[in-house]
Amino acid sequence: MLLRWPKLSPLEYADPKIEYADQRNAPVTPLESADPKSPHAKSCRINTSKKYRGEGVALSLVAFLFVCFSHASFAQQTSKTLQPAHASSSESRPLDAALADAKSRLEEGAANEAEHILRAYLAKDPSSADAHFLLGLALFKEIREITVAPTAHRDATNPPTSSTANFREEKAKASLGEFTAGARYRAPSASDLKIVALDYVLLGDYPDADKWLTKMLEWTPNDPEGWYYLGRTKYNENRFDEAVHAFQQCLKLDPQSVKAEDNLGLAYAGLNRVNDAVAAYHAAIESQKDAPTKNPGPFIDLADLLLDQNRSREAISYLSEAIQIAPQDPKAHELLGKAYARLDEIPQAQAELEKAAQLAPQNANLPCMLGPMYRKQGLTEKAKLALDRCASLNGTHSSPEKPRP
């Protein structure tokens, strides 16, 4: 079976890209409402007690905690069951002027401004579910503004700095905390659940993301984005058959979705259904042939599959197109370097791998490949530097490659 690197990663901006964190097992803390008689005091599990790895964190799917916050602590208590409100029951509620202003600022991309308004509002009215839910959304959007918005194209292999990773983790946990607090006073809506699931994706907790996306889709089965995120989560759980189903559902609702067709190809590849994967990649490429801005993903993923099939020359043509679309995508340069190396076209291979290393300096694969290549050409000093870099990155457990969205 082909071993494909998980596709789910940085939460998308136009195409939300969520860089993800590796998971670390830890107990889940059930929380309960301060008022156990409340109709919304039914349980939820929130993973605020989990430890998440900050390094390798990458970002695209939040899982909700219909948790009812204990006023005292995160001590384990009896859990019950909380059901989300139907979307229309909470999303159509009229907001007062301050909350409407905060919501407007969120829609304009001013998440920090919205946060200040909402915190001031909650200082006066801490029992406002709407304010807590909006603040959860604002904190989530701040992650996107800091870690995603500056990126013009996908950076598949260059992991975030530790400060960025810590920022993302802290904000994701804070976002979940606000949804939890809001659930003390009103059940969340389907759109709230989607953000919760995406918070969990940011923390690398795919089982919880899966759980709450599935619940969200019970309420809004015609949400193509929800199916897309569920497919990405299933893929990261190596549940490829279920990922295929989710991406197919997305495509039924949004037949022109390039990202869903591309990810469908990855899911098929995970099942070793090579012909189906190739067909999906071609369909994704065809669907954007007249688009003014193209997504390089299908070209890169098809080329990657062709390299697995020892079809290096064919792969080169697709990688060349990908680089025309996204010249700063390190994965495209890395694969192109591999393709040239397999054809023994060393100068071209070296140039592409050096470009990839420049774009993704923390990718340990690249100096590890360049070192032997330099040594074969008699470039002793360059070989030593590259191999030392290779050892250093591997010694610090640098992720060799990050998944692309």
Image (cartoon, rainbow, N blue to C red):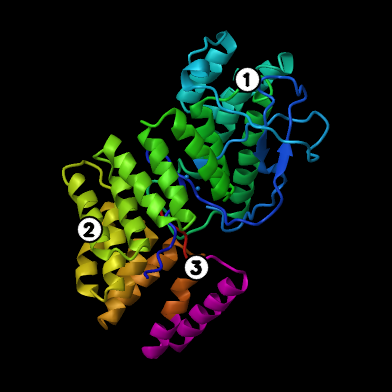
Spatial separation of the CA atoms under disc 3 and disc 2: 24 Å
Residue 143 in sight: no
Which residue is labeled 1 in the image?
186
* Residue at figure coordinates x 56%, y 29% from the top left: 138
The reply, left or right, for residue 79 in relation to residue 260 is: right
Query: Which of the marked residues, 3 or 2, is nearer the chain's N terminus?
Result: 2
Which residue is labeled 3 in the image?
400
Tell whether position 387 is magenta. yes
Q: Nearer the viewer, residue 72 or 286?
A: 72
Q: Position of residue 24 (x, y in %)?
A: 64, 57
Spatial separation of the CA atoms under disc 3 and disc 1: 44 Å
Which residue is labeled 2 in the image?
321
The reply, left or right, for residue 176 in relation to residue 221 is: right
Report helix, strand or loop for mark 1: loop
Segment colored magenta: 371-399
Query: Which of the marked residues, 2 or 1, is nearer the chain's N terminus?
Result: 1
Dividing the picture into quadrants, the one containing residue 16 is top left
Mark 2: which amino acid? Glu
